[in-house]
Image: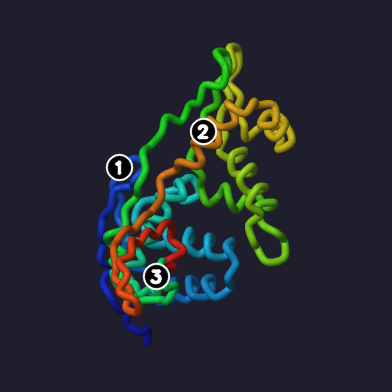
Amino acid sequence: MALPRLNETIWYDLKLPSTGEVIHYRPFLVKEQKILLQAGESNQPRQVIRAISDTIKTCVQEDIDVSSLSSFDVDYIFARIRAKSVGETAELMIKCSECKEETEMKVDIMQTKVVGDMKPRTIQLTPEISVEMHYPTYSDLMANTSIFDGGDDTPKTNEASMNLIISCMSTLFTEDERIDMKNESMQERITFLDSLNSEQFEKVAKFIGDIPKLTYEANFTCEHCSHENELLLEGMDNFF
């Protein structure tokens, strides 16, 4: 005899920070939570990214391409799914900026928000040449294997930054051509980036550096020294 399936599906809605598009999502179930827990215990960023992406694919009603979503869209969606699944608050140990002791704090995940302005995606490099950028996706991180060391998946900061910039260059426009950068070899894209002067490179790097982020801001009083602290959390790492 088939056993009953519990829990009727309850759908919630949210607006994607990048586009304002409304999508619908449900809480994750035990089978999905197991995968998330296993990924978290692995301490490997790639496994965590895969688990978050797979959870969103499963829990969002619309047929969305998670691989094309910006990292801050993914963080925002997952924060909402997590809040509706295992509770809207997370208990975190936060270090005091004064005495360095930790204080337990309850964080309302539903109060997280994406902070940062959406920048124009086309950057003029010369009067004749411009490059169209896209915001980093988790697919950009997954695709660039050189971003991580092979041994422990630890990010290599300088190499990671350069690879991320290269991954986020979508289209190059000249007076005569429209060049799809994904059709160019990695070496060709590296050579192009190396040909920029410092001012041109700064424009491109600033687009990546100024990407919106999932953010939580609050104040708390240290329970050890009574110092008043300002808390700023960014990204999903604090809530996973």
Please, is residue 17 above or below residue 60 in the view?
A: above
Q: In which quarter of the image is residue 217?
A: bottom left
Q: Which mark is residue 133?
A: 2
Q: Is residue 106 left or right of residue 132?
A: left
| Res. 84 in view | no
Is disc 2 in contact with disc 1, using a CB cutoff of under 8 Å?
Answer: no
**Vertical position of residue 54 compared to residue 222: above or below:** above
Q: How crowded is mark 1: few (under 14 residues within 10 Å), some or many (20 or more)?
A: few
SS of the residue under disc 1: loop
Q: Name the secondary structure under disc 3.
A: loop
The quadrant holding residue 58 is bottom left
- The quadrant the N terminus occupies is bottom left
Residue 70 vertical placement versus 43 (above, below): above
**Residue at mark 2 to residue at mark 1: CA–CA distance:** 20 Å
Name the residue tied to disc 3. 96
Q: Which mark is residue 20?
A: 1
Q: Which amino acid does label 1 sit on?
A: Gly
Q: What residue type is labelled 2?
A: Met
Q: Who comes first in sequence, dot 3 or dot 1?
A: 1
Q: Which colour scheme is used?
A: rainbow
User: In terms of sequence position, does the residue under pointer 3 or pointer 2 come before the other?
Assistant: 3
In the picture, measured across the screen, residue 236 lies left or right of residue 178, that is left
Q: Residue at x 38, y 73 (%)?
A: 92
Report how far apart the C-alphas of labels 3 and 1 lie in the structure. 37 Å
Circles 3 and 1: CB atoms closer than 8 Å: no
Q: Earlier in the sequence, mark 2 or mark 1?
A: 1
State the image coordinates of residue 41 (x, y, percent, origin top left). Answer: 54, 75
Q: Where is residue 169 in the image (x, y as percent from the top left)?
A: 57, 34
Task: Check disc 2 and report its element: helix, strand or loop.
Answer: strand
